[in-house]
Image (spheres, coloured by chain):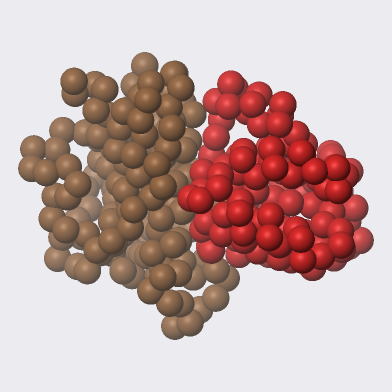
Chain colours: A brown, B red
Amino acid sequence: MSIDAQTLQQVVNDVCFGMLGLSMEPVESESCEEKEALSAVIRISGGWNSLVQVLAPMSTARVIASTMFATSEDDLSEEEIRDAVGEIVNMVGGNLKGIMEGDSSLSLPCVGLADGEAPFGQGFDGITVAHRCQGDALIVRLLDRSANN
Amino acid sequence: MYALIIDDSRAMRRILRQIVEPLGFEIMEAGNGQEGLACLHQVDHVELTLVDWNMPVMNGLEFVKAVRADDGWREMKLVMVTTETEPAQMARALMAGVDEFVMKPFTADILLDKLRLIGVNMTQQAG
């Protein structure tokens, strides 16, 4: 069994629209390379080994945090914005782990400024799904390391 | 009437607070199980604890085991709010004394239904 793009998109939608009520429009491709962006990464290891990354330009990250903290974007701290994006990748990763067979464990999320191709390096051959989240980019990438080995 | 919310994510604690506080609970928050145990010692009676599983320092399962090993907190309702969905893991948590699970992502209605199911005392209903 493996995760396909449709499943990944559904999980992201369940988190962002189903729980948070954010408008989510799937798009063919989206880039945040030219914008300051946050990268939240979580590792799944054990029966299924994979990395999940949420890439969010600061505009998207602020919208997500504002929704989760129920406060205006102006009142958010940097820590709160990172925390909110980290919780998104935690929920996406946890749900993907639940879909896959085998006893796996979830790391704690790691959030920082997006840095090029990190953490995958060039030649990333995993799954990428892109959305317009409240009008701005939200990208989720999955690298199934079990499939690549 | 106190409710304790334990999650390493401040954002998730805020979401849970917004659902539970209108029910008439005074809310305490903790960022991991160890902080949660400290909170329990600060007040006489905590009716409800919502606890995440995957946390640093002391995870949710360790917290549940510690709580259920103490007769003083035997009556407290324990709900795990988690992304953990593996049956074997859930069975471990139930054996340890968890009353109910809520899977992330969730809605307010889902959480409230679970609280009703386990007989949590709600002095007010969420609007």
Q: Quadrant of the N terminus of chain A?
A: top left
Counting from the top left corner in percent of width and height, residue B124 is at: 88, 62
Q: How far from the left and from the top, in percent, is residue A53?
A: 30, 46
Instruction: Give the residue displayed 43% in from the left and 32% down from the top.
Output: A105
Count of all numbered marks drawn on residues in the image: 0
Name above or below for residue B86 compared with residue B9: above
Left/right placement of residue A117 relative to residue A68 reads left
Residue at the limit of the structure toward the left, as seen here: A122
Q: Is residue A110 above or below residue A101?
A: below
Image quadrant in which the C terminus of chain A is located = top left
Q: Is residue B17 left or right of residue B122?
A: left
Q: Position of residue B13 (x, y in %)?
A: 60, 60
Classify residue A95 as left or right of residue A144: right
Where, by quadrant of the figure, is residue A5 drawn? top left
Q: Is residue A148 left or right of residue B99?
A: left
Q: Residue at x 35, y 30 (%)?
A: A45
Where, by quadrant of the figure, is residue A128 drawn?
Answer: top left
The furthest residue to the bottom: A74
Please name the residue shown 36% across and 34% down the image.
A44
Q: Position of residue A72 (x, y in %)?
A: 50, 79
B2 vs A66, nearest the viewer:
B2
Residue B23 visible, this orientation:
no
Q: Residue at x 57, y 70 (%)?
A: A70
Does any portion of residue A60 appear in the rendered image?
Answer: yes
Figure check: B122 above or below B106: below
